[in-house]
Amino acid sequence: MTQTLPAPEVAPGYDTTRVLTVPNILSFVRLAGIPVFLWCLLVLKADILAISILAIAGITDFLDGYLARSWHQVSRLGQVLDPIADRLYILAIICGLASRGVLPWILVIVLVARDVMLATLIPSLRSRGFASLPVHFLGKIATFCLLYAFPFVLLGEQVFSGAHVFGIFGWAVVLWGAFFYWWAGILYMFQGVSFLRRTPPLAMQFVAE
């Protein structure tokens, strides 16, 4: 059975092992919006509708974390589900916008490479009974910047007076978000490698016992 890696010198834990909590349902709703967003963006070319879906996803992203803490519904599933939903949304957005020619593919490669780098830690973490690294505050800032900047980039592509202002603002936040995204990724790598060096695999722990 896997669990989320505790932050150093902090007892993070969780409040429940339940699956059907309000925060988890919001995360499932956010995940369900991904194919709808891509359909609106790539098939219908309904940009405003696609932006609206991203706005709803952003609201649910804030709400599920807030409610989990306020209602003491932090769950083991939620600790894994929430960052997965964020990663999938970022992947869907950047690939969708790149397919439309709104983003350069080099930016897609830069952002995906960071997640591929972190994915190399997963087998070693699972061998020690953990599913993921704890969410770092800087990582949340990076995710927030990216998720909220891309809709402005898409707005900047629209044909109406002042649309370019949205594009300029969106690109400024995207660049900062990409910088923070990689910075957080490097911190995660250091944290993960440090943990792996201190913690032997479960099989070795059982032998030692």
Image (tube, grey):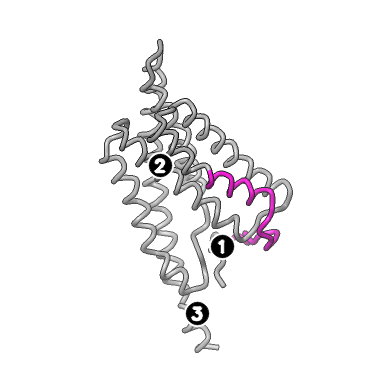
Label 3 amino acid? Answer: Leu
Q: Is residue 206 above or below residue 97?
A: below
Determine whether the residue tagged by mark 1 lies in a helix, strand or loop: loop
Label 2 amino acid? Answer: Phe
| Of labels 3 and 1, the one closer to you | 3
Question: Outermost residue, front direction?
Answer: 44
Q: Is residue 96 left or right of residue 80?
A: left
Q: Is residue 86 above or below residue 19?
A: above
Between the C-alphas of marks 2 and 1, the distance is 22 Å
**Residue 204: where, in percent of width, then height?**
47, 84
Question: Outermost residue, right direction?
Answer: 71
Circle 2/circle 1 CB separation < 8 Å: no
Determine whether the residue tagged by mark 3 lies in a helix, strand or loop: helix
* The residue stretch that appears in magenta: 8-32
- Disc 1 residue crowd, few under 14, some 14–19, many 20+, Cα 10 Å: some
Residue drawn at x 37%, y 16% as measured from the top left: 159
Between the C-alphas of marks 3 and 2, the distance is 33 Å
Q: Earlier in the sequence, mark 3 or mark 2?
A: 2
Residue placed under numbered mark 3 in the picture: 202
Across the whole image, how many numbered discs are drawn on residues?
3
